[in-house]
Amino acid sequence: MTRPSFVIAIAGGTGAGKTAVAREVKAAVGEPVTRLPLDNYYRDLSHLPFEERRSVNYDHPSAFEWDLLADHLDALLCGRAVEMPQYDFSVHNRREETVTVEPSEIVVVEGILALYEERVRDLVDLPVYVQTDADVRILRRIQRDVIERGRDLEGVMDQYLSTVKPMHEQFVEPTKRHADVIIPEGLNRSAVDLLIEKIHAELRASDEPTLEA
């Protein structure tokens, strides 16, 4: 059976520009691209009260349901649709509704630890790491969490110093060694263009007829 999808994983620190790169890829390649944001695979914490959910370390690998993500990737590669969870940052938990994700030619897994879990890495064809200066990343994090997600500045800073920064150093940055492509300073135009050309080449290769003996 011909493998129906080409899987790209885009990892990197908080605020590095991973989502911007993933969106650039989708815009350039078009319809055949499916995005699986790693944030949607935070574990279901419905059994915990809100205050306990607030204190969970969401930058630690244990915060994610890796088996579900790997199962979904495996299903997409076999040509089957999946029901992807949706995450609500305002309540620190999954929403009740899911989104149906259909298999496509390109699947992009995007998140801080997209290159962490071995079972997921084994399903990835092109591992990418977005490397951006820490000062830029924290400013982007503040802007996102305060403006877009309605959190207070003090809480965002406390979270960054207590969990985000140490988890980045311990778990996120070391995954750079698994990357085949490193994109410097976030949305680096030249690097992103090379990544997009690589994807186009893969799509062209998949369209070429194969000769059978």
Image (cartoon, rainbow, N blue to C red):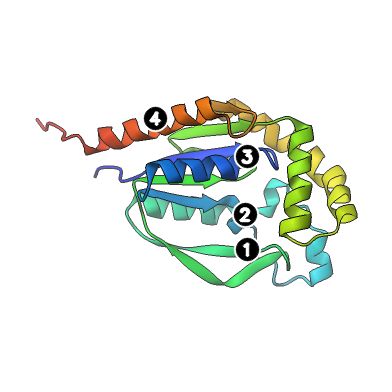
Disc 4 is placed on an element classified as helix
Mark 3, mark 2: which one is toward the viewer?
A: 3
- Mark 3 or 1, nearer chain start: 3
Q: CA distance from mark 4 to mark 1?
A: 32 Å
Name the spot of residue 17 as percent of width and height, x first: 63, 39
Residue 198 in sight: yes
Q: Residue beneath label 1, please? A: 87
- Mark 3 or 2, nearer chain start: 3
Q: Residue beneath label 2, please? A: 39
Q: Are marks 4 and 3 in contact (CB under 8 Å)?
A: no
- Mark 4 or 1, nearer chain start: 1
Mark 4, mark 1: which one is toward the viewer?
A: 4
Mark 4, mark 2: which one is toward the viewer?
A: 4
In the drawing, what numbered circle is on residue 197?
4
- Quarter assignment of residue 166: top right
Quadrant holding the N terminus: top left
Q: Residue beneath label 3, please? A: 17
Other residues around mark 1 within 10 Å, as few (<14) / some (14–19) / many (≥20): many
Left or right: 1, with 90 as reference point: left
Q: CA distance from mark 4 to mark 2?
A: 27 Å
Q: CA distance from mark 3 to mark 1?
A: 20 Å
Disc 3 is placed on an element classified as loop
Q: Is residue 11 above or below residue 73?
A: above
- Mark 4 or 3, nearer chain start: 3
